[in-house]
Image (cartoon, rainbow, N blue to C red):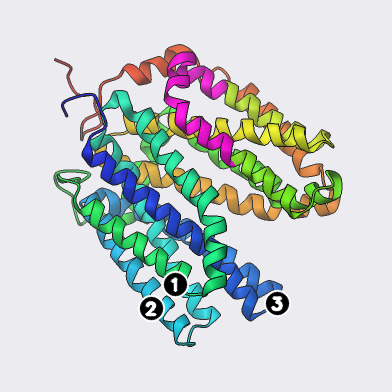
């Protein structure tokens, strides 16, 4: 790769990712609204969350194998067109009055299954179209686009369009996936994980290969395990945040929504200036300060009765979240051999999703048994233990060496530097 800038190939990937995030966000808002308009059964309504998370647990690991076996760009295009087709069927069924909750959940299952594999493929393509020195900036742009569209624009827009007609958000989502397919298809080049693949190898063997490689890398192994563990405490905290906001902070629905706005604005700011902040304070201190912010968020939620303090803590956490993702994704893209990028990335996605699932269940159980602030005190203690256990893992020499290493080859050894 020549040059040291983000070129047209990345621009097409970024636009595809951003538009997909807009459509996905609108469908995420519209789906529970549609279910709630058809039934008030809590079990049926909550089943939507299971449908959303189940594909991540079922298909993340085998999906990573697929990403490493085929051309990743073509795989992304196929996934997008499949999602266009199923969403078009759903929208048409809604317009004609033939859509039911079962059809909606079946479509969401297919769409989210595609998202699992698509995201692993997209993360594996990025280092092939972006110079190593610009990975942080590229990941920041990708995260920022998703943050704006999915967390700030899609919510109110999806809710408004649903009021106009229930089918519109899903039809728009199909349109955004179609645009994504066209744009990704225009990205020049071939993006196979390896030159040749032994088709006789089992999926289990290939998953195990990626897992063993990840376990052998202390830095990446630690970051992957951390994201799974910290997602447990974070999701547990957010699962009961509505109760904390109303019962302890005295906020109404608007105030509760404003807390998530603080989180989103912080995430957007982090995505916008993250590459410069990381360069200024180093990746080591980006990670270490981020872990301190993680502990601070849980402490603020556990101890504060002031909405402003909680809002500031969520804003700071949003900044940290963007920077953490930039460092974690960039390090993984720098250090992982191209032939393993799909499997290593999907292992990270699998553990992150597992943490989210456990946390969603744990938050309510702990709060119900020990009080509304209990999940936050647990999160604070876990964060302190994590800081103590991993502080030295992220020492400056180790992280600097990771940034300085030349890109690995297909065999996993660094390429020679001229």
Local secondary structure at mark 3: loop
Where is residue 311? Give x, y as percent.
Answer: 71, 36
- The reply, left or right, for residue 13 in relation to residue 19 is left
- Res 237 label: none
Residue located at (44% from left, 28% from top):
327
Precedes in sequence: disc 2 or disc 1:
2
Q: Tag 2: Cα neighbours inside 10 Å, few (<14), some, or many (≥20)?
A: some
Residue 418 position by quadrant: top left
Local secondary structure at mark 1: helix
* In-front residue for pair 264/133: 264
Residue 32 position by quadrant: bottom right
Q: Which residue is mark 3?
A: 40
Local secondary structure at mark 2: helix
- Label 2, label 1: how many angstroms apart (C-alpha)? 9 Å
Q: Which residues are magenta?
A: 264-288
- Res 107 label: 1
Q: Main secondary structure of the magenta part?
A: helix
- Res 89 label: 2
* Above or below, comparing residue 31 to residue 266 in the picture: below
Between circles 2 and 1, the one closer to the viewer is 2
Residue located at (82% from left, 36% from top):
306
Where is residue 73? Give x, y as percent.
Answer: 23, 51
Where is residue 363? Give x, y as percent.
Answer: 72, 50
């Amino acid at each position: 790769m020549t040059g040291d800038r983000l070129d047209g190939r990345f621009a097409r990937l970024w636009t595809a990712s951003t538009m997909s995030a807009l459509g996905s966000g609108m469908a995420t808002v519209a789906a529970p609204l549609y279910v709630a308009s058809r039934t008030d059964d809590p079990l049926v309504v909550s089943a939507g969350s299971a449908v959303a998370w189940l594909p991540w647990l079922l298909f993340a690991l085998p999906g990573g194998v697929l990403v490493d076996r085929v051309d990743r760009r073509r795989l992304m295009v196929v996934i997008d067109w499949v999602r266009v087709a199923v969403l078009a069927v759903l929208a048409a069924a809604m317009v004609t009055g033939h859509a039911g909750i079962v059809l909606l959940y079946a479509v969401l299952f297919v769409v989210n299954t595609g998202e699992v594999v698509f995201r692993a493929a997209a993360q594996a393509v990025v280092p092939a179209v972006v110079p190593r020195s610009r990975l942080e900036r590229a990941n920041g742009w990708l995260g920022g686009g998703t943050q704006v569209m999915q967390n700030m624009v899609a919510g109110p827009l999806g809710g408004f369009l649903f009021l106009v007609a229930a089918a519109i958000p899903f039809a728009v989502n199909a349109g955004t996936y179609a645009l994504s397919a066209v744009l990704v298809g225009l990205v020049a080049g071939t993006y196979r994980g390896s030159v040749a693949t032994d088709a006789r190898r089992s999926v289990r063997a290939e998953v195990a290969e990626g897992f063993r490689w990840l376990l052998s890398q202390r830095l990446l192994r630690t970051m992957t395990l951390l994201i799974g563990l910290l997602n447990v405490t974070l999701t547990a905290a957010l699962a009961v945040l509505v109760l904390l906001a109303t019962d302890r902070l005295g906020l109404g629905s608007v105030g509760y929504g404003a807390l998530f706005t603080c989180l989103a604005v912080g995430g957007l700011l982090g995505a916008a200036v993250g590459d410069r902040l990381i360069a200024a304070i180093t990746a080591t201190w980006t990670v270490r300060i981020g872990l301190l912010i993680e502990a601070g968020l849980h402490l603020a939620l556990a101890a504060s009765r002031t909405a402003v303090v909680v809002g500031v803590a969520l804003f700071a956490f949003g900044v940290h979240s963007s920077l953490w993702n930039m460092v974690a994704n960039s390090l993984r893209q720098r250090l992982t051999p191209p032939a393993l990028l799909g499997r290593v990335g999907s292992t990270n996605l699998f553990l992150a999703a597992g943490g989210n699932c456990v946390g969603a269940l744990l938050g309510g159980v702990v709060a119900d048994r020990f009080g509304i602030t209990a999940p936050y005190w647990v999160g604070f203690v876990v964060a302190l233990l994590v800081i103590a256990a991993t502080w030295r893992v992220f020492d400056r020499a180790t992280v600097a060496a990771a940034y300085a290493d030349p890109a690995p080859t297909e065999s996993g050894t660094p390429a020679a530097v001229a």
